[in-house]
Image (cartoon, rainbow, N blue to C red):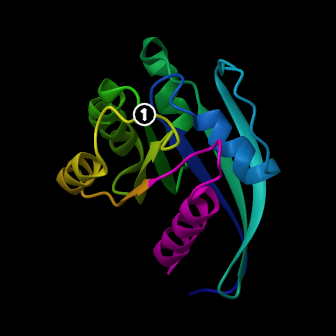
């Protein structure tokens, strides 16, 4: 892994209300609020990580989940080194919709690392992790189960993405 200081742009993709903003808040501030806050446009947060010998400032772009704003999405994706694509265990259509999210993301940035996060694992699931893994394999993406509410795998998901992003720097 390289050493030094890096500033890397990471996008969070997925339908509205899948928990993108909650995941960012849990990772950056270690807090959870179950009041739904609709994101308008994009919100950028920063968190510094150490990956091997490198200091990484992760610029996290929380992209609005409304597909009606798709023309804006392409502008937000420019310069991104990777993405966390989020679906909601309580809404199966949010997983299926990731195919479109990933397609539009890759059409702008190319074959950058993407990890699929199946979020809201603390709630009653409407689909299984096996289904998410199969879906992820079809898109050539690793998957992780997360809960912004409990914090399950949130730190790990961002850390794993940090490693993938730094591997791509080499």
Q: Which residue is mark 1?
A: 124
What is the x, y in percent for residue 37? 70, 20
What is the crowding at mark 1: few (fewer than 14 residues within 10 Å), some, or many (at least 20)? few
The quarter holding residue 5 reads bottom right
Decide if residue 51 is on the left or right side of residue 140: right
What is the x, y in percent for residue 18? 50, 30
Q: Residue at 46% across / 40% down in the picture?
A: 86
Q: Residue at 35% across / 52% down in the picture?
A: 110
Q: Residue at 74% across / 39% down in the picture?
A: 32
Q: Residue at 71% across / 52% down in the picture?
A: 27
Q: Which stretch is magenta?
A: 145-170
What is the x, y in percent for residue 35? 72, 21
Magenta region, main secondary structure: helix
What is the x, y in percent for residue 104? 35, 34
Decide if residue 15 is on the left or right side of residue 10: left
Q: Is residue 165 magenta?
A: yes
Q: Quadrant of the N terminus?
A: bottom right
| Residue 157 vertical position relative to residue 13 in the rendered view, above or below | below
Q: Is residue 141 magenta?
A: no
Decide if residue 94 is on the left or right side of residue 120: left
**Secondary structure of the residue carrying numbered label 1:** loop
The front one of 170 and 43 is: 43
């Amino acid at each position: 892994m390289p050493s030094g200081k890096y500033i890397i742009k990471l996008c969070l993709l997925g339908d509205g209300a899948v928990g993108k903003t909650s995941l960012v808040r849990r990772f950056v501030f270690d807090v959870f609020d179950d009041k739904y806050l609709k994101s308008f446009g994009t919100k950028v947060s920063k968190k510094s990580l150490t990956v091997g010998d490198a200091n990484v400032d992760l610029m996290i772009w929380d992209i609005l989940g409304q597909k009606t704003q798709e023309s804006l999405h392409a502008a937000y994706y420019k310069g991104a080194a990777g993405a966390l694509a989020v679906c909601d265990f309580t809404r199966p259509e949010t997983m299926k919709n990731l195919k479109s999210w990933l397609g539009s993301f890759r059409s702008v940035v190319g074959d950058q690392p993407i990890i699929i996060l199946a979020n809201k694992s603390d709630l009653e699931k409407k689909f299984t992790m096996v289904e998410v893994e199969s879906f992820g394999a079809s898109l050539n993406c690793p998957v992780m189960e997360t809960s912004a509410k409990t914090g399950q795998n949130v730190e790990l998901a961002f850390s794993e993405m940090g490693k993938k992003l730094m591997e791509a720097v080499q």
